[in-house]
Amino acid sequence: MAMAETPANAKNRRTLTSKDQETPANAKNGRTLASEDQETQISPSSILAFPSTPSNPAPRRPARKLAFNPEHSAIQGTVSYADSFETPKPSKNGKRTGTRKTEAVQEKKGLVDDGENSKKSRIQKNNGERSSELLLSPISPDISECRKRKRLFAEPEASAFSGKGNGVSSTNGGRSVSRKGKSGHSVEEDGSSGKNVATKNGKWKKEFAKNGKSGKVYDDLVVLRNTRSSQNARKNKKNEQNSLKFSGHGVEKKGNLGLKKKRVFYKKIVYDGAEFSVGDDVYVKRRENASSDGEDPEVEECRVCFRSGRAVMIECDECLGGFHLRCLKPPLKEVPEGDWVCGFCEARKNGVVVELPKPPKGKKISRTAREKLLSSDLWAARIESIWKETDGNYWCKARWYLIPEETTIGRQPHNLRREIFRTNDFDDIEMESVFRHCYVMTPKEFSKSSNDGDDVFLCEYEYDVQWHTFKRIADIDNDEESYTDGDTEDWDSSKDSGSDMEEEYEYEQERLKGVSAAKNSCHMHEPAANSRKGQIFGLQRIGTKKIPEHVRFHKQTELERAKATLLLATLPKSLPCRNKEMEDIAAFIRGAISGDQCLGRCLYIHGVPGTGKTMSVLAVMRHLKCEVDAGRLQPHRFVEINSLKLASPENIYKVLYEALSGHRVGWKKAFHLLNERFSESNRLSKEETQPCVLLIDELDLLVTRNQSVLYNVLDWPSRAHSKLVVIGIANTMDLPEKLLPRITSRMGMQRLCFGPYSYQQLQEIISTRLKGIDAFENQAIEFASRKVAAISGDARRALELCRRAAELADYQLKQTVGSTNSSHNAKAGKCLVGMAEVEAAIHEMFQAPHIQVIKGCSKLSKIMLVALVRELYKTGMAETTFDKLAVSVASLCASHGEKCPGWDILFKLGCKLGECRLLLCEPGTRHSLQKLQLNFPRTVQSCLGFPSPWQSIVPLLRLEAVSKGHYVICSVESGHTIELASEECQS
Amino acid sequence: MSTGAAADAQALLRCRLSDPRFSLSPSPSPDSNYSKLKFILSNSIFESCNNSVLLLGPRGCGKTTVLELVLRKLQTDHPDRLSVVRLNGLLHSDDRCALKEIVRQLCTDHQLIFSKMASCDDNSQFMLSMLRECALAHKAIIFVLDEFDLFTPGKQRLLYSLLDAMQSVQSQAVVVGVSCRLDADQLLEKRVRSRFSHRKLLFLPPSMEDLQRLLRQILFLPTDSSFRHSDFAVKFNAKLSVIFNGEGFIDILNSVVGVDNSVSHLLNFLFCAVCNMDSGSGFLSLGSFKSAMLSVQRQLKLESLQDVSILELYILVCMKRLEAKDCGSYNFNSIMKEYKGLQDASQTGAYYSRQVCLRAFEHLLECELVGFTDNNRGQSLSIEFRAVVLLISSHELYQGLRSSRNCPDILLQWFDRENPKSHAY
């Protein structure tokens, strides 16, 4: 949504920093390249730390010419394929070919399992595979885990809280199982990563050394590793066994070495001297044996002098060419801020034909990997999973990236040079064809990555190869997702690893083919888009055909930024004015959760709408989650339920049960199961569970006739060992008192009141949001806060008011800009939102519209209203029948020389005024007996502006009333809220 | 040739009058509701902010017209960036039904398969995920809720979930409510009101000058090449200007607009006038405007009274007399007694039997000139015993009697005797 920073349209200049030995100074403006060739001393830590972030770039490998002795032990690394084939990639023109593998691969490998093409068998194979070679210490079969996750939901508590202090809090047990397992593994892995890898590497490199290959570089490494490996080999075995046990899956099949040929999955391998793990982005070779494969220059050459050197280089944003600062005309002293375009590109833009300087004779122009990628000589992909085939080859599943030229719409002018698109196109490729690492970043990271090397790319959108549409990659905020997601299945399916998505994608393939072919026949087994299963399929289709330009080009003005921050949807960074209440809530939850015996408790929060109740509780829970992550607090579960979104009050059982266990059952069964779960007898048999914090919004909607739902929900916390903490939010202060006494005693013990905001608080809230943006006058903010505080004290109102004022100011600004076409720089200075705009916004938001409507209605309507007022004074009663009204109208018309309309017309007009609620009237079926009364009697008197002679009527009426000695106060105003009445008084 | 021109002209004018675009001025000023609404909606598309707007105003003032125009313009300017979901309070007031309709429209918009069997939970889940996906794809969804005030009875679950969805970052949508009730936002529950961003656009009937301008804009034929018979058009326009400036027309216009100055009423009137155009000469005359006025201002009760038979008139007068006697509620039997009494007194000899009178009475019930007062509680009783009351006033009855073709004088006498003052007006 509206991001505060505009990430990509101001591509940062890559600034060069002259780094020390770790990175050669010979980088282009900011792309610091690490090359091993130039490093003579490599500290072991830099080798053994295998980060995937570019802060420590992975060591580069030279071109690979490796051949292993195949009859060596289990570690079958890269078999040198003399006739290496092209990396299996189907056509990328958006057409999906049926098979995913090219024929060559299959023939070559002669793979027994045709599981590549049939998903099912592959999944079956994947299930529960453990390594047959413990030396390789597979980390965890991630695909099988997902499957297991789904099966293990019956035992959510199986995740042994091992006291490791990881403090992973999650919304469902199943997830925590896997995460535990994984984290357990990875912790092990990381801790002993050096050793583990060393083992592999050790063996690897042993081969190297044995074959006397280009291991010259690695000799010292080999030495290091060998020493370690021998010591740790035994330790590793133990570790692996422990870690395997630790995962607590219980579905371990050990000892099936060689019995069946199955795949072995890895999370991280070291291949060819570089480590690849799941989630890495890599270059993938496109052609086999290309002569240019061998070249992989570390640094780019200056376009002018064709030399790399140690001088500072700057990169052009257009052509991505490197120029020495001193080679530029005029030579620059330092790297300028912001975008910079080289002289050649500028000239080209202006239409001048430009001749680039030619390289000196005989010099071979070598291209960097990045250049090759951007000219379609290389591909980029993301590794989704890695495995080892039965014949010992290593394969990975790759998710392709596309450069803009390869999409159907082509390169748009607002695509950045370094932009690539993620696709949902997966393929299995051999590790052989993986070239080396590159780094694909989100816009936020990209804007910060000035110094991270040449292989940095931006990926903001996802491209759907089937539908040729773009979609922004969602910012997955883990906090929000894990807290607000009560539905396990959806979450699983959306966050599954590649194979699951692939399966569903393939399923959708077939489904779509069916759809296009014969719509009627396949309706049986196609999931509809609005059914649970079908949502994943259908929503892939949503996307735009091309990225809209304004997203890239438009720089937000101050006013627009102000508007964006004032949006109710944007979460503020902090919640001012509610610190005390948040402290109370946090204390309550901490007190309830920690301690050995989690005593279930209830907290009742009340306050008028818009005072920040739900927001405070969510903020506190986020904060507590951070504490849990840091290990200071016991992990707990958080479930948020909004009663107004439930179909019926009983459904809360269903939703709660689903959130706690992941199963979907009917509400009766859910109630039964929850009862069992929270009751005492069961507690002793099960292990420890996590305490659960339940937030119920709009509590008063759970009140049923016999109040049983509310009773049950509030009763569970009061049982021993239930570990349920309930926070209820409602608007009425005395809700507990209105309920049955047994509920009152359970609910009403602890209450927290959120009062309406005062004007200072509102002012503070608005100013905090607008911090750093200079778009509002302080007076205007104060005026708005005072107005809203006087009426309701609702923070939403205040924010909306200011946003509306900003919108009005923006509107006026854009109108003037559009109409006069003058340079609005002059006006930009005075585009502050001032009192006038706030005044106009207040008028629009608070003013009742009936005044204007009365003033603008037709003549006969006005006569009718006057006649009603007359009747009101005559009889003293607010209500009158149509009969009498018509007589009155007729007499008025007659006495003023106006033609009296027919009664039908009058009747129709009366109904129309009643529809607007200027009058209150009965339905028209009552005909002459219809009762009418004025809705705004006072306003009628004051705002009827008649042309004479009618102007005499109104004072006449007043006179009449005075002579009669009484004014009748109508009770018709009871339908209004307070604020409307105040407006009427003003009018 | 003039007949061809006349037919063409009539067709052209009729098209114009039926086309909503013509009632809008060609270049709306920045202050007009059109520009404001367009600004709000395009804000949501370009700046991806969520909004909710209410369009208020008396019926016939152009709320839906302007909204449709804005939507059409935005859809032509930015295709593929907009998705519209239309709900009507008359059809979809039930929450579940409305949610299903929203999902169905979203599915058809994006060519997804829709299942009728999906539960309410599934549907709301789908709506939220759809909002999220469209926000990621830079698509804005606009929810148009016609007859907004009819969504407010009940728990307002639909409104709550829609407006709550506006509050999350993961959606890019606008909720536009259209209502003719001026207090539509007061009908919202306090929770829902708090979430509603109180933007209101008020649509007022145009002023007299605007109406005059509109008149000329609609009725003047185009003299450029778009209309085939340009010389006919010139003559037509000249004649029309003469009529417009005449006194008679101004009176007619005043009387039409004096009743109801909304745009739709004026357009109705003009349509009648165009239909009454003289097909021979093909010109609009004052007469056509006059007849249009008469047809727009028909007195339907009077006409139905004129069609009523004499016996029925008798019954009506009897009922009137009973009411004047102030004897509380009465039913058919009392009417029969009165009728008998009258007949005995005047000896007209037109005394019909009870059965015949009952038939006449039932006919009056059907015409809704008389009606029951017991609110269907007396369904079990037969017609003769249920309390009835006159649904027309004595004034109307008097006028009906006077204008009736075959009303016997005796009736009028009876009427006058009972109500000496009622027909003074």
Image (cartoon, grey):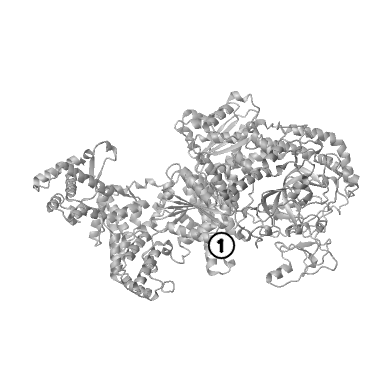
Count neighbours of disc 1 (C-alpha within 10 A) and say few if under 14, some if 14 to 19, many if 20 or more: many
Q: Secondary structure at mark 1?
A: loop
- A746 vs A87, nearest the viewer: A87
Classify residue A949 by image quadrant: bottom left
When asked about the image quadrant of residue A155, the answer is top right
x, y (%) of residue B74?
52, 60
| Kind of residue at badge 1 | Cys
Q: Report if residue A430 is visible in the image.
A: no
Q: Is residue A902 visible?
A: yes
Q: Is residue A381 left or right of residue B319?
A: right
Q: Is residue B181 left or right of residue A439?
A: left
A109 up-or-down from A957: above or below:
above
Q: Position of residue A808 (x, y in %)?
A: 51, 59
Q: Is residue A140 left or right of residue A944?
A: right
- Location of mark 1 (residue): A831
Instruction: Identify the chain of the residue marked 1, using the numbered disc in the image.
Output: A
**Relative vertical location of residue A451 with respect to residue A639 in this rendering, above or below:** below
